[in-house]
């Protein structure tokens, strides 16, 4: 669940890309990177592990010269946290090509073999983004022309679509040509187009979320359509073409539940408005099904901060006071995307602190956006108990998450999901609450569709186990489980650390 940005401008882009990445930081806290093309047609690249503010110092920004560039914040779902897998990636041939990617390819293994056999291209990391870059490079290489026209680029994207499967929102820069944005045929991961007029010329920007456009002074034009490619030349000419067969919009529902910022608009949907609707639906369910418990609730408290808008609507419908019972330490990352169970547990305590007066001797309804592993929920409930709550009720704005995600979200194994194989009462007991309620899936999808009825469907695989791309087998799920479990991650991090120490030595 990474964040990507790209700008083609008549002015230096380094500061605008940096500012945009800071607003996309919530999408990835593992690593950050920026690549620009300077006046001598050379890539200028800086990437490293860490937050945006830590990776880029003044000396780095000064070196990132150029009027076009890409930026990336990484949230690792494949590979390791080694800096070698941070983005952007680039290859020198053909032309000089750089790429950033948000999502996950589901046929990586067979693609690696095919690419090596057909084009003798070697993939040096476990990152599917490096693989995607080389697949695109191979198709551009086959054009065999000194200068590419827009149709050549669209044909290369069309061939890339046919090779790869999964979720992908991508930006690529071709030295001497321009920048191309493309999105998978289901539009699972988000990508928007913005523009601004500067001294009589039109400049363009792409980003994972519309909020990144705002900080750079760009106006939201529209979303990149599923399967579409948009090509912007370095002199500001824009071309667009549908490059996939049977493209239909099925965005990831979890973008609206958790990942995206509330001030973003994605696929014509205000994330804030969608969350307000989630609160309305869930509040009505609680009022209908929890007659006795609803009367006993003294206060509604959100788990900061994705669920605040949801909790406010629930309190309004139930006629109960809404209070802020937790204070968030903004300098601790999102615990859901922490790489290991021990780290997630310790981070919850560092991230949140209770306002004891809001809990003492009260029956409290806690509201959160979702329950994934249950680690955060259990810790939060324990904190509320220690603060003096008499009874604790818990409401999740999303349904039970029972299945792994394969499209770029770190929900890799069924066994690590608290709802897998358990009913609501069993989950409630595990996290330590007196009563637990989950949003209905139909209510969740309706909450988003209320803002854009044109959306035909959603990727809801984490709730249903039905994968929109139609290519996910039990064997594939077993494979990613073995690669991405907490124990597997620990081993990869240890191996990467030993390798980096050896290299330094």
Image (cartoon, rainbow, N blue to C red):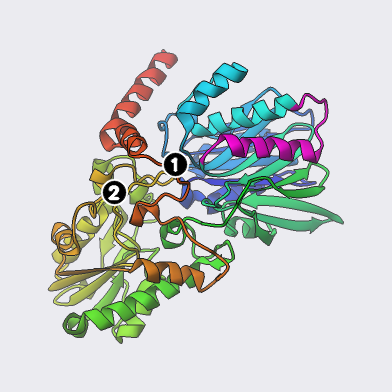
Which mark, residue 4?
none
Type of secondary structure dominating the magenta stretch: helix
Compare marks 2 and 1 and give the one earlier in the sequence: 2
Relative side of 184 to 319, left or right: right
The quadrant of the image that shows the C terminus is: top left
Q: Are marks 2 and 1 in contact (CB under 8 Å)?
A: no
Residue 414 in percent (x, y) is at: 27, 45
Q: Which residue is mark 1?
A: 471
- Residue 36 lies, with reference to residue 351, above or below; the image says above
In the image, the segment drawn in magenta is 143-165
Question: Which-is-in-front pick, marks 2 and 1?
Answer: 1
Residue 83 in percent (x, y) is at: 47, 29
Query: Which residue is drawn at the image coordinates 47% and 55% (left, top)?
Result: 252
Q: Nearer the viewer, residue 383 or 367?
A: 367
Q: Which residue is mark 2?
A: 347
Q: Nearer the viewer, residue 185 or 61?
A: 185
Query: Which residue is drawn at the image coordinates 29% and 37% (left, top)?
Result: 485
Residue 275 in percent (x, y) is at: 44, 70
- Quadrant housing residue 61: top right
- Residue 31 lies, with reference to residue 11, above or below; the image says above
Q: Nearer the viewer, residue 49 or 186?
A: 186
Residue 380 in percent (x, y) is at: 23, 60
Q: Is residue 325 magenta?
A: no
């Amino acid at each position: 669940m990474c964040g990507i940005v790209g700008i083609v401008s008549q002015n230096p882009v380094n500061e605008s890309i940096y500012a945009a990445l800071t607003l996309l930081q919530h999408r990835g806290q593992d690593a950050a990177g920026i690549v620009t093309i300077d006046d001598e047609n050379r890539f200028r690249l800086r990437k490293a592990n860490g937050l945006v503010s830590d990776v880029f110092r003044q000396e780095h920004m000064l070196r990132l010269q150029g009027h076009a560039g890409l930026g990336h914040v990484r949230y690792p779902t494949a590979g390791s946290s080694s800096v070698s897998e941070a983005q952007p990636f680039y290859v020198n041939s053909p032309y000089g090509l750089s790429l950033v990617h948000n999502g996950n390819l589901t046929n990586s293994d067979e693609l690696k073999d095919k690419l090596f056999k057909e084009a003798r291209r070697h993939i040096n990391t476990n990152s599917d983004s490096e693989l995607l870059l080389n697949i695109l490079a191979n198709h551009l290489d086959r054009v065999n022309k000194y200068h590419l026209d827009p149709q050549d680029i669209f044909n290369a994207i069309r061939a890339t679509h046919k090779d790869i499967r999964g979720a992908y929102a991508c930006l690529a820069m071709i030295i001497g040509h321009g920048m191309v944005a493309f999105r998978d045929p289901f539009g699972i991961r988000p990508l928007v187009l913005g523009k601004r007029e500067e001294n009589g010329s039109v400049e363009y920007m792409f980003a994972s979320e519309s909020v990144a456009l705002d900080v750079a002074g760009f106006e939201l034009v529209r979303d990149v359509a599923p399967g579409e490619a948009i090509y912007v030349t370095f002199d500001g000419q824009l071309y667009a073409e549908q490059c996939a067969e049977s493209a239909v919009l099925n965005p990831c529902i979890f973008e609206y539940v958790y990942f995206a910022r509330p001030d973003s608009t994605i696929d014509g949907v205000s994330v804030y408005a969608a969350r307000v609707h989630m609160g309305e639906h869930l509040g009505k369910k609680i009022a209908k099904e929890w007659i006795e418990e609803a009367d006993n609730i003294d206060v509604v408290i959100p788990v900061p901060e994705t669920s605040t808008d949801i909790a406010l609507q629930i309190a309004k419908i139930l006629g109960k006071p809404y209070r802020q019972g937790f204070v968030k330490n903004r300098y601790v990352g999102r615990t859901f995307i922490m790489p290991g169970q021990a780290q997630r547990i310790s981070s919850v305590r560092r991230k949140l602190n209770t306002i004891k007066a809001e809990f003492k001797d009260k029956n409290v309804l806690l509201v959160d956006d979702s329950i994934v592993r249950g680690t955060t929920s259990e810790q939060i409930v324990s904190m509320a108990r220690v603060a003096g709550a008499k009874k604790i009720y818990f409401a999740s704005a999303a349904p039970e998450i029972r299945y792994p995600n394969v499209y770029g979200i770190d929900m890799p194994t069924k066994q690590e999901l608290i709802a897998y194989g358990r009913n609501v009462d069993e989950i409630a007991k595990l996290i330590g609450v007196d009563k637990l309620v989950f949003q209905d899936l139909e209510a969740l999808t309706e909450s988003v569709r209320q803002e854009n009825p044109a959306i035909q469907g959603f990727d809801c695989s984490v709730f249903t186990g039905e994968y929109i791309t139609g290519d996910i087998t039990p064997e594939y799920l077993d494979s990613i489980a073995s690669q991405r479990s907490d124990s597997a991650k620990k081993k990869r991090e240890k191996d990467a650390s030993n390798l980096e120490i050896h290299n330094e030595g």
